């Protein structure tokens, strides 16, 4: 998936040609979706380096996000990762991780009982799994270092490479919550395998988020009545 860059957030130093994030821009375009209220993405320079889960140094990019949902529905946020060489660049980097700190506001008019995230590509009806099998951006699975946390929903009920679900609490209308999670990127620099690391190796991903709303009392009653009618027909 190719998208034009609207906001260039931060340029990072070049790393090893094998598996390094040479340039990162966090925003490929505005967030969209029926749940949209407002969103902001801000990179926090400078990048950090650590020996996290693999030998060698791992580059950590911190991104601050503020997001408001005005409806209990999807918000898709396109993000862009560039892989192209610049002169020099030290120290060598074996992998890169994005540390996401997000503040989410519930302005939907109803309480939430959970929150879902999914990684893929495309927007809205065009959203789906990565079409390039070599794209390897995940929710830091299996290492989970650090593990994802959500202030309103303390239970991580699902954590796969591309899906993250929080539950076990209630966020009332008007409430705010904080979420911290990691995105690990081990995609090859030369994504198109043409022997050259350049702008043609840019690729885009989408972070999809959707709150899980509490059903209205009337909806619960109707669902129960429908089940009772089906049961009576079967008798």
Image (cartoon, rainbow, N blue to C red):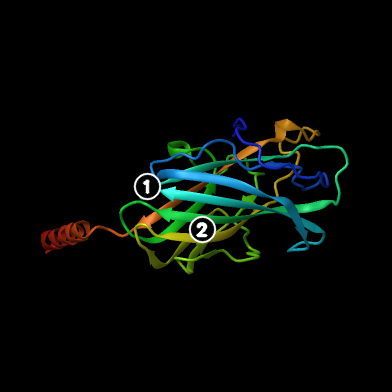
Residue 104 versus residue 202 in the image, above or below: below
The reply, left or right, for residue 15 in relation to residue 203 is right
**Mark 1, residues whose alpha carbon is within 10 Å: few (<14), some, or many (≥20)?**
some
Residue 98 versus residue 31 in the image, above or below: below
Q: Secondary structure at mark 2?
A: strand
Q: 34 or 56: nearer the eye?
A: 34
Distance between mark 2 and mark 1 Cα atoms: 21 Å
Cβ atoms under marks 2 and 1 closer than 8 Å: no
Q: Secondary structure at mark 1?
A: loop
Q: 48 or 57: nearer the eye?
A: 48
**Mark 2, residues whose alpha carbon is within 10 Å: few (<14), some, or many (≥20)?**
some
Q: Which callout, 2 or 1, points to the residue nearer the camera?
A: 1
Tag 1 residue: 70
* Residue 223 found in image quarter: bottom left
Q: Which mark is residue 18?
A: none
Tag 2 residue: 164
Q: Quadrant of the C terminus?
A: bottom left
Q: Quadrant of the N terminus?
A: top right
Say which residue appears at 60% left-offset and 40% top-offset.
27
Q: Position of residue 78 (x, y in %)?
A: 55, 40
Question: Closer to the N terminus: mark 2 or mark 1?
Answer: 1
Q: Position of residue 124 (x, y in %)?
A: 44, 39
Q: Position of residue 177 (x, y in %)?
A: 46, 61
The reply, left or right, for residue 203 in relation to residue 71 is right
Say which residue appears at 76% left-offset and 43% top-offset.
22
Outermost residue toward the right? 88
Q: Position of residue 108 (x, y in %)?
A: 34, 51
């Amino acid at each position: 998936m190719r998208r034009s860059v609207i906001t260039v957030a931060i340029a990072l130093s070049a790393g090893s040609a094998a598996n390094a994030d040479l340039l990162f821009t966090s925003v490929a375009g505005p967030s969209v979706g029926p749940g949209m209220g407002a969103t902001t993405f801000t990179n926090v320079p400078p990048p950090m380096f650590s020996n996290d889960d693999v030998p060698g140094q791992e580059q950590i990019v911190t991104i601050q996000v503020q997001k408001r949902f005005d409806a209990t529905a999807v918000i898709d946020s396109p993000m862009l990762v560039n892989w192209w060489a610049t002169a020099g660049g030290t120290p060598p980097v074996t992998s890169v991780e994005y540390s996401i700190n997000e503040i989410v506001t519930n302005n939907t008019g109803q309480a939430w009982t959970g929150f879902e995230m999914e990684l893929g590509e495309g927007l809205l009806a065009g959203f789906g799994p990565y079409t390039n099998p070599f794209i390897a951006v995940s929710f830091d699975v299996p290492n989970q270092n650090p593990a994802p946390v959500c202030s309103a929903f303390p239970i991580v009920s699902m954590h796969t490479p591309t899906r993250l679900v929080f539950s076990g609490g209630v966020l009332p209308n008007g409430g705010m919550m904080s979420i911290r999670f990691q995105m690990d990127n081990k995609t090859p620099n030369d994504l198109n395998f043409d022997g050259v690391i350049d702008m043609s190796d840019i690729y885009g991903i989408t972070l999809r988020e959707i709150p899980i709303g509490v059903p209205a009392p009337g909806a619960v009653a109707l669902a129960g009545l429908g089940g009772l009618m089906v049961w009576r027909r079967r008798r």
